[in-house]
Image: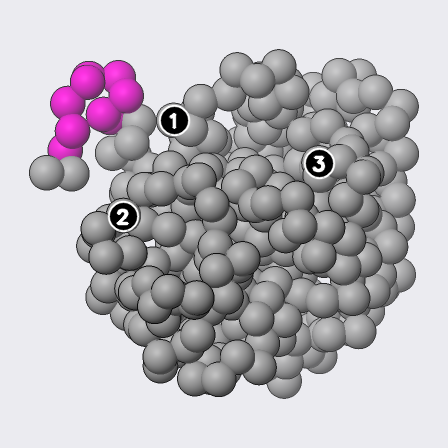
Amino acid sequence: MSADLFTAPDYFQVDDLLSDEHKLVRDSCRAWVKKEVTPIIEEYAQKAEFPAHLVKGLADLGAFGPTIPQKYGGGGMDYISYGLMMQELERGDSGVRSTASVQGSLVMFPIHEFGTEEQKMKFLPKLASGEILGCFGLTEPDHGSDPAGLTSNIVDKGNHYLLNGAKMWITNANLADVSVVWAKDENGDIRGLLVEKGMEGFTAPEMHGKWSLRASATGELVFDNVKIPKENLFPDIKGLKGPLSCLNSARYGIAWGAVGAAMDCYDSSLRYAKERIQFGKPIASFQLIQKKLAEMITEITKAQLLAWRLGTLKNEGKATPQQVSMAKRNNVEIAVDIARQARQIHGAMGITDEYSIMRHMANLESVMTYEGTHDVHLLITGMDITGINAFS
């Protein structure tokens, strides 16, 4: 792995829109990624192994639940600070950012929003400190983009619930101490509950053979007559509003994170193009290379401004799920395109682990699909602007 020489592009002086606190949060995270992530991430991706030793550092950074109140161990930060952290983490690796996104947006967020005070005090401080990890169980083998069709179910047995079913494509599944799981009750209502590691009948096998997110742990959640204590149910939330609000929070972080991956590919490409000599001069002097670089920085700049504006709206409580969908879809799309152009600029070196390009490219293919697929987010925008539901 080459030395991490990353310099963040800021063509439209977006830094001027950030507070001193925002920049301190971002710069601290950037320094940590340079010190702890980039020197080791290629090795772990090659091994298809999650670098579990990074969990403590992520917790110390405040990357687990940055917007959760300090009372529960969170950072009490605003949404732009959260976004900037996700940008820097994904600049290092999508899998590292996914770990933080799942812990904060998909585990801590629903516990804070929907849990009892006892649930909050039991789980949130330990999740924030990295003492325990969590995961989020919504997607099933036969139900991804259509979560309303999920078949995992709970039956009320008087003093406990009996949970049966399975979840798939779950980040941190085999590592999680607590799983936020969504299942249907006897009335057909989707309910959220907390499943703890070690409960009888609960297994979480790890999935292997991935070509993407190789430095991230992915697995299944399997429930075979698992007894869930009544106190582990979220008491009041019913229906898809619960899990979709969690996904909306995670998608927001992805909209920022993808910009980080795009920045890394661009920065590496700009440096390589200036240093790589062909036909007696740097390839950066050729029109086709300049076209690629100019288009990269243009799209990154647009994505930066989109993410910043979305963060401002989130801070004001005005951001809609549809706006989040647009930002997630757009920013992941431009990141994928930039990674592909960067690979061409790097030539054959672009497929080696001396550079981050191919790893980012492969990772982003998964990011384009999870937390709502590329096309589904397009239809969300379509439905918002036309008022017509194309899903049914």
Q: Nearer the viewer, residue 388 or 277?
A: 388
Front of the two marks 1 and 2: 2
Q: Upstream in the sequence, badge 2 or badge 3?
A: 3
Image marks 1 and 2: residues in contact by CB distance under 8 Å:
no
Q: Upstream in the sequence, badge 1 or badge 2?
A: 2
Q: Residues within 10 Å of mark 2 (few under 14, many from 20)?
A: some
SS for tag 3? Answer: loop
Residue 200 placement (x, y as % from top left): 48, 84
SS for tag 1? Answer: helix
Location of the C terminus (image quadrant): top left
As for residue 383 lying within the magenta part, the answer is yes
Q: Upstream in the sequence, badge 3 or badge 1?
A: 3
The residue wearing badge 1 is 322
Front of the two marks 2 and 3: 2
Q: What residue type is labelled 3?
A: Thr
Q: Which residue is drawn at the image coordinates 65% and 20% (left, top)?
A: 315
Q: Which residue is drawn at the image coordinates 69% and 57% (left, top)?
A: 123
Image: magenta residue range: 382-390
Q: What residue type is labelled 1?
A: Gln
Q: Nearer the viewer, residue 289 or 87?
A: 87
Q: Nearer the viewer, residue 141 or 231?
A: 231
Of all residues shown, which one is farthest toward the front?
158
The residue wearing badge 3 is 67
Disc sitting over residue 7 in the figure:
none
Query: What's the CA distance linking mark 2 and mark 3?
Result: 29 Å
Q: Which of 200 and 216 is in front in this view?
A: 200
